[in-house]
Image (spheres, rainbow, N blue to C red):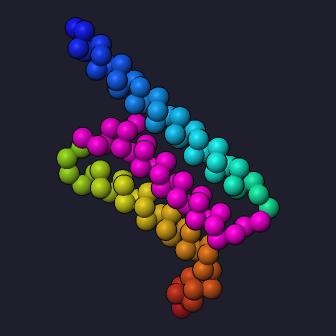
Amino acid sequence: MVSLLLKFREQNKQLCLVWMLLLTFTLLSALIAEQDASSALMVVLVCFSFAIKGSLVTERLMGLYTAIGNVRWLMLAYFIVLPILIGGAILFPDLVARMTML
């Protein structure tokens, strides 16, 4: 019984740490996004924050770090590929326009 309570307490500490990290990354992203200047560094920081937050949610809050199979890797790939695509579209709009022209 005591070991079960200690395990629950350790899991609770990990979830609180993940929650605090998510709040921190969200606040930092909001502060960066509120700036008037849109530089490449801001885009990269916001995309990086999005990728980190997505992987934290997938791994820890959804509990997919114990999942066997492709579900975990598909979810993690989503949070890696999507920020790269969004950041690339914002940083290189002419290249994206040329690639998508008929």
Q: What count of labels does the image hold? A: 0
Q: Identify the residue at image location x=42%, y=30%.
A: 15
What is the span of residues highlighted in magenta in the rendered image? 37-66
Find residue 18 and report its horizontal and vertical position in percent.
46, 36
Task: Give 85 or 14, whichever is nearer the viewer.
Answer: 14
Find residue 55 and report its horizontal and vertical position in percent.
41, 49
Horizontal arrangement in the rendering, residue 62 relative to residue 23 (left or right): left
Image quadrant for the N terminus? top left
Residue reaching furthest to the right: 36
Q: Relative to 80, is 29 above or below? A: above
Quarter occupied by residue 2: top left
Task: Give 93 or 51, whichever is nearer the viewer.
Answer: 51
Image quadrant for the C terminus? bottom right
Residue reaching furthest to the top: 1
Q: Relative to 22, is 95 above or below? A: below
Quarter occupied by residue 67: top left
Dominant SS type (magenta) = helix
Quarter occupied by residue 5: top left
Q: Is residue 93 magenta?
A: no
Q: Is residue 59 magenta?
A: yes
Q: Identify the residue at image location x=24%, y=55%.
A: 70
Horizontal arrangement in the rendering, residue 92 relative to residue 4 (left or right): right
Find residue 43 and report its horizontal and vertical position in percent.
62, 65
Find residue 62 and report its horizontal and vertical position in percent.
37, 38
Q: Identify the residue at image location x=35%, y=26%.
A: 11
